[in-house]
Amino acid sequence: MKRRIAIPAAIGVAALALTGCGGASPNGSTEGSGTDDKLVVWNWGDADEAAAAYTEDVKAAFAEKHPDVEVEIVNQPFDQYYTLLGSAVEAGTGPDLALFNGGTQLKSRADTLVPLTDELADLEDTLAGWPAFQADGETYSAPMFLQGFPIYYNKALFTAAGLDADNPPTTWDELAEACTAITEKTDASCFALGNKEGLGIEFFLSGFASGIFTPEEYDAWIDGDRDWTSEHATQVLQMWADSAANGWYNEGANSTAMFNDSFDLFSGGKSAMAWAS
């Protein structure tokens, strides 16, 4: 596919980027999965009904402006996505467009992508999240969606632990006290994190680091300039180690837990029943 596609978007932490393979090659090559009349797009998650509906809406909008171009959506498994994408790009058979997480996943592959700085300039004032999709002064994608990290708490288990179900924790110290009561007075773990493989730290860092790092530290972290021994990095890692050692997280995904998703601190005192089995 020739380099003539600007991608419409919403807001967020993931986006489609024009790859340097297929017909979108920076050197004008037409090798790869795309052709002049076909656009190949890789993504993940279209098994979800809402995501699939969004994709169909985007395809329809694109078809109105480019009726002679066929769009092929290739859904890849997320747990293998970047491995498959890297292999395809290396072989010159990758897609014209690929969905990327913002930050390191995109920035570390910038040399395989086509800059869209000029094409996306008119969107800069209407979308948020641009730094996650920029590297070395170039913009490689427009942000598409923002993923939030809410927490839901189980009011029945809250009451069973002797806590005030109408007043959930709003600080780290209050959260620690609540988790202690939950683990001591009920059979539930504090968070439904499914931490058997220890991967919960990724979500923990996403949720808590942004509130601990200074804005400058956070921007550097997103850009891949990471000091794991700094005061604030050590602080958030210690918080994870302490909370895990204190039994806050269930090992499997099917244990009863007080809180569903340890991604962010409580906001506004909103409540709902956490899933449990």
Image: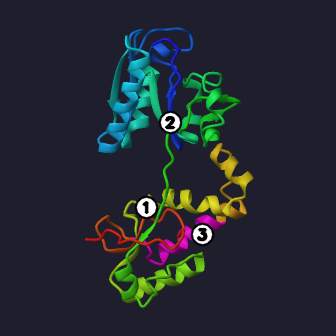
Q: Please report whichever mark, 3 or 1, sits nearer to the chain's N-terminal start.
A: 1
Q: Which residue is mark 3?
A: 238
Q: Nearer the viewer, mark 3 or mark 2?
A: 2
Q: Which residue is mark 1?
A: 198
Q: Residue furthest front?
A: 64
Q: Is residue 231 left or right of residue 167?
A: right
Tag 3: residue type? Gln
Q: Residue at x 46, y 82 (%)?
A: 166
Tag 2: residue type? Ala
Tag 1: residue type? Gly
Q: Please report whichever mark, 1 or 2, sits nearer to the chain's N-terminal start.
A: 2
Badge 3 marks a residue whose secondary structure is helix
Q: Residue at x 59, y 36 (%)?
A: 133
Badge 1 marks a residue whose secondary structure is loop
- Measured Cα–Cα span from mark 1 to mark 2: 27 Å
Residue 213 position by quadrant: bottom right
Q: What is the span of residues highlighted in magenta in the rendered image? A: 235-249
What x and y, as percent, mark residue 267?
Answer: 54, 68
Question: Of helix, strand and loop, which mostly describes the magenta segment?
Answer: helix
**Which label sits on residue 15?**
2
Q: Residues within 10 Å of mark 3 (few under 14, many from 20)?
A: few
